[in-house]
Image: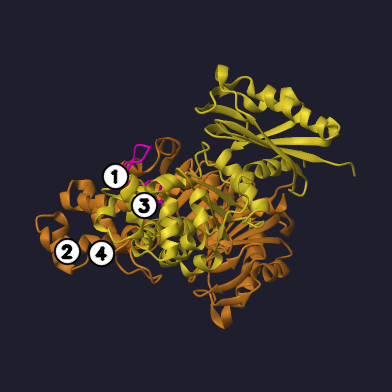
Chain colours: A orange, B yellow
Amino acid sequence: MAEQWLAGIDVGGTTIKMAFVSMEGEIIQKWEIPTDVSEGGKHITTHISSSLKHTLKTLGKEEGVLKGIGLGAPGFIEMKTGFIHQAVNIGWKDYPLKDELEKETGLTVTVENDANMAAIGEMWKGAGNGESDLLCVTLGTGVGGGIISNGQIVHGVNGMAGEIGHITSITEGGAACNCGKTGCIETIASATGIARIAAVGMENHRDSSLYDIWKESKTLTAKDVAVEAEKGDAYAAQVLDEITFHLGLVVANLSNAINPGMIVIGGGVSSAGETLLRPLRTHFEKFALPRVAQGAQFAIATLGNDAGVIGGAWLAKQSIK
Amino acid sequence: MAEQWLAGIDVGGTTIKMAFVSMEGEIIQKWEIPTDVSEGGKHITTHISSSLKHTLKTLGKEEGVLKGIGLGAPGFIEMKTGFIHQAVNIGWKDYPLKDELEKETGLTVTVENDANMAAIGEMWKGAGNGESDLLCVTLGTGVGGGIISNGQIVHGVNGMAGEIGHITSITEGGAACNCGKTGCIETIASATGIARIAAVGMENHRDSSLYDIWKESKTLTAKDVAVEAEKGDAYAAQVLDEITFHLGLVVANLSNAINPGMIVIGGGVSSAGETLLRPLRTHFEKFALPRVAQGAQFAIATLGNDAGVIGGAWLAKQSIK
């Protein structure tokens, strides 16, 4: 059979990650182009189309080798039609992205929320290992997520599914969240939340190795907390315990409802690896039903920044089946 | 086209509810037979098969009119194979229910968890109104649930999905739950939980109309609480407010993750109707993201005891498509 390639495209506010991916999910070539947010993002589809064609040519391939495109973008997206209600960082507003990119390329385009697309990537080729009931939790500046049930992304009635970051973990007296509520898990388990919680108790823990970092710059990062906890600092471990108590509760509560076979933890905070997973599992098991806990394996995301484009390729593959 | 009927069967510990249902989901005939739990439930499939044939004959129909069977049972079920790991109330243990009933009847049988089957019934012909992203919460002796995403029941990796009753709402100092954990929403929002919570504060609320019921028998029911709250009793309303705070939190947290278009409240407690839904919506809206709250309509289950057999018919219909 003639060679068939898929394109995965991950549109961010600064750069657009692009890749050619094989039908088996292996990256053949990956590159980035800058995101041109001028004039409401109207030039983006032209740039994507030109860049795809140019790169194919550079690789000595006919255009016909490319069979479909899967694209992820941030914002409110109507997945079925590929219509973007609003993508603030890009400039798109009431924009028929799927139609425009299909016109430019002559290929079938599937549009997806970028967090969901990364979850699909992890399901297909990353830590998810093909598991068709999957929960992805991304711990970065914020807390995001993606849920896969019966092998399909859960979008919900208006594309809001997976907003795990805004599950309330502290019902009264929690920190203010960007969403307008208080006590969301994003205020606790994001990189920002971890740094904030560690800083709050700093003056009362001058014996902690975190204090040496703190006193210099009055700044702590989630990474500082993880590194010092790993080295054996008691206060840093206590902070991680508090954070994983809340994250374990949220993930267990959700797991009692959707019973995932795999829980993939991604984002910058996940680089803490077992230092994070160990207390997380302990708290999770307190709140999950025994059979639910039994079924759920924890794993750190493995694809990093490639999760999006690989997920995009999976979507493209589905669309041409 | 020749007439086509579906059979929906809802197996409980005492009775088996059976119905012939049209392809459009209308009940043609419904009846019950006792559940014979003797000898590990081995006679049940024979009884079901005979009863189906006998009832068809009584109605003057050929056996060929019946096209498929959907059956719900309590317990741990492997949905794909229709294998029952254990159904304590029935007596089945490591029992190939689907295979046995298919042998008896010569028809395709789909086996489902009974709570999920009721959720499907509500989705198809009840309060769910065809909505393909649906959350069903059953408030009875316990708290059960069913989740439908993308028009499909969410089973999870080992059939435990929908165990909404065991989502933790009180992390410390909550009441003991039958599952072995504490603070599960089942200990609060079940009929049993509501009665317990009302009784706890009774001696400090002697002016409440609930006290008149309480002093006679030292017993309260969830229905007493709903009735007196509806009549304007302040303490009863306060109890309902406490209960719906927790239920609203749990349902909102779950909704932020799965973004349902409809939330159907069923079970005995749901007969309280608007007296329950009014405070529930208020608390829900505090914890749900605005767009999630916008998308989610609340409704009281409308099919009552028929939800199971109608859901069974839907499953049967899918299997013969």
How far apart in space, not on screen, are marks 1 and 4 (Cα)? 19 Å
Quadrant housing residue A78: bottom right
The subunit carrying tag 3 is B
Q: Mainly helix, strand or loop, the magenta region?
A: loop
Q: Which residue is mark 2?
A: A214
How far apart in space, not on screen, are marks 2 and 4 (Cα)? 12 Å
**Residue B183 shown in magenta:** yes
How far apart in space, not on screen, are marks 3 and 2 (Cα)? 61 Å
- Residue B76, percent from left and from top: 52, 32
Mark 3 Cα-neighbour bin, 10 Å: few <14, some 14–19, many ≥20:
some
How far apart in space, not on screen, are marks 1 and 2 (Cα)? 24 Å
Residue A196: numbered disc = 4
Question: Do discs 1 and 4 belong to a common subunit?
Answer: yes
The subunit carrying tag 4 is A
Pointer 1 or 2: first along the chain:
2
Of A45 and B71, the residue lying toward us: B71
| Above or below: residue B42 compared with residue A230 | above
Question: Do discs 2 and 4 belong to a common subunit?
Answer: yes
Determine the secondary structure under disc 3.
Answer: helix
Q: Label 2 is placed on what type of residue?
A: Trp
Q: Which of pointers 1 and 2 indicates the residue nearer the eye? A: 1
- Residue B57, percent from left and from top: 82, 30
Mark 2 touches mark 4? (CB < 8 Å)? no
The subunit carrying tag 2 is A
How far apart in space, not on screen, are marks 3 and 4 (Cα)? 51 Å
Magenta residue span? B174-189
Q: Label 3 is placed on what type of residue?
A: Ile
Which quarter of the rendered picture does the N terminus of chain B lie within? Answer: top right
Q: Residue at x 70, y 32 (%)?
A: B109
Q: Label 1 is placed on what type of residue?
A: Pro
